[in-house]
Image: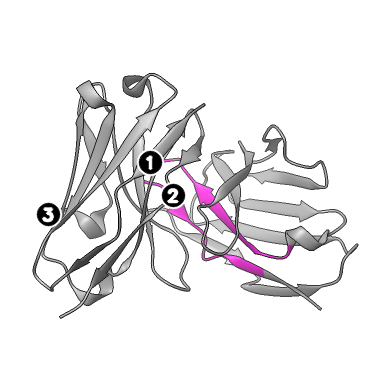
Amino acid sequence: QVQLVQSGAEVKKPGASVKVSCKTSGYTFINYDINWVRQATGQGPEWMGWMNPKSGKTGYAQKFRGRVTMTRDTSISTAYMELSSLIFEDTAVYYCARWAVDDLDYWGQGTLVTVSS
Amino acid sequence: DIQMTQSPSSLSASVGDRVTITCRASQDIRNDLGWYQQKPGKAPKRLIHAASSLESGVPSRFSGSGSGTEFTLTISSLQPEDFTTYYCLQHNSYHITFGQGTRLEIK
């Protein structure tokens, strides 16, 4: 069965970077784009960007350009999202999700990133 | 970027009621819209894609309609497990945007 398993919770100081992993299984990794979505407590989901695992091509939301980098390691079917220059407002649950034709069909369990001094 | 305006932001209803949630797009997005349900502490779960196509396994009391700039999600007869939060998502451009969400509460 399709699974996306994310890395564990992180606590970071302002100005630091965080890298979240998303290990996939149950399907051919390079055939589906991976998207990243974050959600602050009590807020709606916020789309961050997408990555094509086959080509490595990415597209980022305007808000995150210059601070976010999405990469992958096809040998282990894993996608990564790195966010730099963290601020308190980056505290949120970060999700990876698979894009299937016209929706996000499978999601990771979420990774809580807390930015605290 | 395309903006999605979802309404209402919250809604009180009773088991058995019929409810409708609306999303309006800032420009024509054809039928490139989906609806998601999110329960506390969980990732969003897809309900409807392409504006009106029900995902496999989703109860038939959920339905979607619309195209262009106005879309609706209807739940025909609310069940206890339906009282949670709903979001629309547009993907007309390569940049996805979500609606602000509708919290469905028991009256």
Magenta run includes residue B85: yes
Name the residue: 40% across, 37% down: A4
The residue at the point 61 percent across, 73 percent down is B9
Front residue of B89/A100: it is: A100
Residue range corresponding to the magenta coloring: B83-103
Q: Earlier in the sequence, mark 1 or mark 2?
A: 1
Q: Which mark is residue A98?
A: none
Q: Residue B24 location in percent, x, y?
A: 58, 58
Contact check, label 1 and label 2, Cβ < 8 Å: yes
Q: Give the mark nearer the N terminus: 3 vs 1.
A: 1
Nearer to us: label 2 or label 3: 2
Please state, as top left, top right, bottom left or bottom right, where the C terminus of chain A lies in the image.
Answer: bottom left
Q: Is residue A109 above or below residue A73?
A: below
Determine which of the numbered discs, if any, sits on residue A5 in the image.
1
At x 52% / y 56%, what residue is drawn?
A: B42
**From the viewer's perspective, is B33 left or right of A2?**
right
For the residues marked 1 and 2, what is the alpha-carbon distance in whole angstroms?
6 Å
Which residue in the protein does label 3 denote?
A66
Mark number, residue A109: 2
Give coordinates of residue B60: x percent, y percent: 82, 41
- Specify the subunit that label 3 lies on: A
**Do callouts 1 and 2 point to residues on the same chain?**
yes
Amino acid on which the number 2 mark rests in the picture: Gln
Q: Amino acid at mark 1?
A: Val
Q: Secondary structure at mark 2?
A: loop
Badge 2 sits on which subunit?
Answer: A
Earlier residue among tags 2 and 3: 3
C-beta proximity under 8 Å, tags 2 and 3: no
